[in-house]
Amino acid sequence: MQSGDILIPFLYAGYRRVMRQQTEIELVRFNTRALLDQVRRKHFRHITESVDVCYLQTESLACICQIAPGVREIWLHSVLNHPGTPKEVMRYILTHEMLHVEVRPRLLTESEWRAKRANKQIGDKEMEGLLLKESFHPPEFFEREAELSPAAVSGPVWSWIGRAFAAFLIIDHEREGLLVKPKAHRQLASWPRPTMAEAREFNQRWGAGAMRGCG
Ligand SMILES: [Zn+2]
C-alpha cells in the first residue's frame, strides 16, 4: 500500500469533520440535494463521480471542488441559502457546476480569448496574462450550457442574480468567477429579493445584464 492510499482517506475524514461544522441548515424552499439528483438524472447520467452539495460561507457564489479522487462537492454561498431563492435559479446553478465535470478546462487560442474580450467577459488588461492559462469556460462550455439551460442562459435567471446580489458581487475575470463580498450574507439576510416574475419583466426590458457568462 502506498502512503497516498492512507493519507487521502485520512485527510478526507478530517475535511469532512470541518465541513460538517461549517455547512448550514437549508433555508431554501426546496431540497437542494434532490434537485441536484434531478439535474444529474436528466443531463449527467454518464458522470459516475460522487457529487454532494452544501451551503457555506465561501468566496464564490458557487463552485465545484474536487476534494478526493472521484469525489466532488458543489459549494453554494450562504447568500443563496434563503427562502427567496427560486428553484429555477438553483437548477441553473447546479447544471452549470455539473457541466464543469463534463467540459474540462483547456488553453484557449488567442482568437478565442479575443472573442471573450468582444463579449466583454474580460478586459484588455487581463487578456495578455490569460493567454497562458487554462479557461474554465471554453466556448464549448457555453455551447453545451445553452443546450442544457436555454431559457436560463438567455432569460431571467441572470436578471434575478443581478437584481438580488449585484451590489454584493465582484466579477473575477482571472478566475472566471463571481465572488461575494465579505459580510454580504449578513447584509443580504434581510434584503428583499425579487420574484422570478419581476426578474422576467426586468429581463424583457434590460436584458440579462453584465454578469451573464461568469461563474
Ligand atoms: Zn463556471
Image (spheres, rainbow, N blue to C red):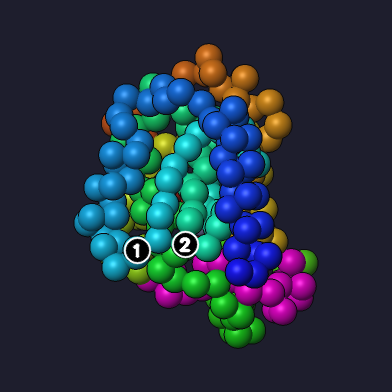
151 versus 35 height, above or below = below
Q: In the rendered structure, which disc, 2 or 1, sits on the residue that comes first in sequence?
A: 1
Q: Position of residue 140 (x, y in %)?
A: 43, 75
Tag 2 residue:
70
Please name the amino acid that badge 2 sits on: Gly
60 or 205, which lies in front? 60
* Position above or below: 158 against 196: below
- For label 2, the crowd category at 10 Å Cα-Cα, with few meaning under 14, some 14 to 19 and many 20 or more, is few
| Image position of 121 (left or right of 99) | right
Please give the label number shown on residue 157. none
Query: Is residue 133 visible to the viewer in this orientation of the structure?
Result: yes
* The magenta segment: 126-143
Viewport quadrant of the N terminus: bottom right
Q: How many marks?
A: 2
User: Which percent across, then down, holds residue 56?
Assistant: 56, 33
Cβ atoms at labels 2 and 1 below 8 Å apart: yes
Left/right placement of residue 32 relative to residue 106 reads: left
Relative side of 122 to 201, left or right? right
For the residue carrying disc 1, how many other residues have a C-alpha within 10 Å: few (<14), some (14-19), or many (20+)?
A: few
- What residue appears at the point 55 percent right and 57 percent down from the top-left corner? 68
Q: Name the residue under label 1.
A: 48
Please name the residue shown 59% across and 29% down the image. Answer: 22
Q: Is residue 28 magenta?
A: no
Q: At numbered mark 1, what does the secondary structure look like: helix, strand or loop?
A: loop
